[in-house]
Amino acid sequence: MQLITVGTVAFDRIETPFGVAEKTVGGAATYISLAASVFLDKMGLVSVVGDDFPQEVMKEMRERGVDLAGLEVLKGKESFFWAGRYHYDMNTRDTLETRLNVLLDLDPNLPEEYRQAPYVMLGNLDPGVQEKVLDQMNDRPALVVMDTMNFWMDSAMPKLKEVIARVDVLTINDAEARQLSGEHSLVKAAAKILAMGPKYLVVKKGEHGALLFNNDRIFFAPALPLEEVVDPTGAGDTFAGGFIGYLARTKDHSFENMKRAIIVGSALASFTCEKFGIERLLEVSREDIDARIQQFIELVDFDIELVKA
Amino acid sequence: MQLITVGTVAFDRIETPFGVAEKTVGGAATYISLAASVFLDKMGLVSVVGDDFPQEVMKEMRERGVDLAGLEVLKGKESFFWAGRYHYDMNTRDTLETRLNVLLDLDPNLPEEYRQAPYVMLGNLDPGVQEKVLDQMNDRPALVVMDTMNFWMDSAMPKLKEVIARVDVLTINDAEARQLSGEHSLVKAAAKILAMGPKYLVVKKGEHGALLFNNDRIFFAPALPLEEVVDPTGAGDTFAGGFIGYLARTKDHSFENMKRAIIVGSALASFTCEKFGIERLLEVSREDIDARIQQFIELVDFDIELVKA
């Protein structure tokens, strides 16, 4: 295994000001694995679904190199279900309904060949579950990336901080960075969060891009301005999957290469926004990705001589 | 005159979650002129104040090359006053009070030497007043930059659109771009707004940076993540002043040079946020500006080879 991912595999109901998807396949681990599969061919997925989860999607994942020995299928039970509604800005949303269903039974027991994976992606989940995955690794992985959200800061902060202390890269949004650190300035927030353990902090700002912090260094990657944003669900997970997939492929954890991984993750995330669910991500070709990375290069390119008096 | 600016010259009362400034000098034309003076030495200012406006600030402006023949001083009257309160995010604010005072009497009559200025900055004001300034120019200026806001879209849209049709560059924020165009996607909004007349659209996103649109080209400039944001008031005007000041100095209206002007404007705006009012902007040296431009260069710098299968 080049990478293992723990996270939800689920159904979503998504309302935006411009349309509705009644029941679409989603879940953090789904997006992460599909995005990482652009760069990798042997990944493991740790999660649980009911027997309502579509066989075709599992087949699709296997064909892309995602091993499902770690995906428990519970007979007669229903998969995790989330319903949300986006505001007009398409950058903020309300949760309308959460049915945990099988997620209540998620107690990961990693297949033996998962336990030596050098790259581990802890998708947004109960930090207790994230910790169990880390505890089952045979050695300290080469790189652990963790995603989380404000819900766990509100309900499980001590455990959350324990897990944060054990990871290399933490990805959260700007409001969460402020909440976790108690600092308004993102520069100060990043310093406090890096002192909690991670070497890198990625602050995701949705349509406003992402910031990468490491020691005193900062890198900013914009989001690509899109003609049409249909559904941002999964964009953050797609970003994380592209990010860790690129790193697992290149095996270079320098700041320079982390910046590249951020651009690659941002490029993949921009595709996810263009259709509901995982649909657009499944269609994307290597040429599409290269063309989009080229757009990122041009978007921020400028050439200035410092102004002399 | 290299540049003339019309806009408010005013007092502000500013509340942030972290502090209060009871009565500080502000106003769009104040920030614009001071920022432009980094690059220019002969500028005109068109506005009106009461005799309560501090002589020291006028002296300071004159010393920086801002001619005040176009600044009417009305005896026994009070200057325009605005009071606002910033939300915790420091990126949105509520207006608490607006006392127009002398602004009700603003009926610009440009001094003769202002009427040949090649660069004109129409600061945020009643579009009827902005139009009067344009009408008094002897020739079509080389470049007209216009700033405006949602208030004029709500109250004077027909006149606003008349003026927009006559300018080269329009600067507004993202919500205003959506309101003006009726389009949610900024890419689509920009296309509609450029069809209204301007060759360039600058979308200001505060702490999230700025976008420049021209035909099918897009450039994104981040805002610099700051250790401490004390007061963002005037940041947009400082940006505009640095932008047009740089263009008036370099006399190059190509897309490449517009990008440089955006970076320079963003660098200057970042200083304005560091103290209340115009205080920080007055202190800034040429070396400070160069150092900050260097930070922008590093902030977005990355080097990626397109990923091959």
Image (cartoon, coloured by chain):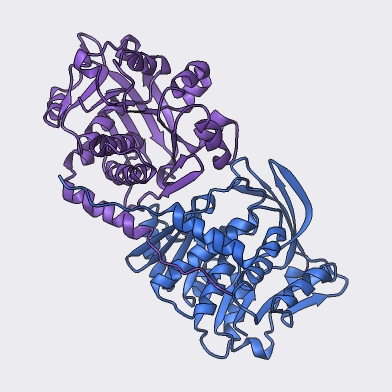
Chain colours: A purple, B blue
Quadrant housing the C terminus of chain A: bottom right
Give above or below for A98 relative to B50: above
Q: Closer to the camera, B63 or B116?
A: B63
**In the visual, does B288 lie left or right of A272?**
right
Residue B125 can be seen in this image: no
Give above or below for A178 relative to B131: above
User: Residue, x 78% and y 69% (percent of image)?
Assistant: B57
**In the visual, does A121 lie left or right of A174?**
left
User: Residue, x 74% and y 83% (percent of image)?
Assistant: B69
Quadrant housing the N terminus of chain A: top left
Q: Position of residue A167 (x, y in %)?
A: 41, 26
Q: Where is residue A210 in the image (x, y as percent from the top left)?
A: 42, 44
Q: Closer to the camera, A93 or B182?
A: A93
Q: Closer to the camera, A137 or B118?
A: A137
Q: Where is residue B262 in the image (x, y as percent from the top left)?
A: 49, 65
Rendered image quadrant of residue A58: top left
Rendered image quadrant of residue B4: bottom right
User: Residue, x 25% and y 23% (percent of image)?
Assistant: A117
**In the visual, does B214 lie left or right of A5?**
right
Q: Closer to the camera, B127 or A72?
A: A72
Q: How many marks?
A: 0
Give above or below for A107 relative to B122: above
Residue B134 can be seen in this image: yes
Q: Position of residue A30 (x, y in %)?
A: 25, 28
Give above or below for A148 relative to A77: below
User: Residue, x 49% and y 39% (percent of image)?
Assistant: A215
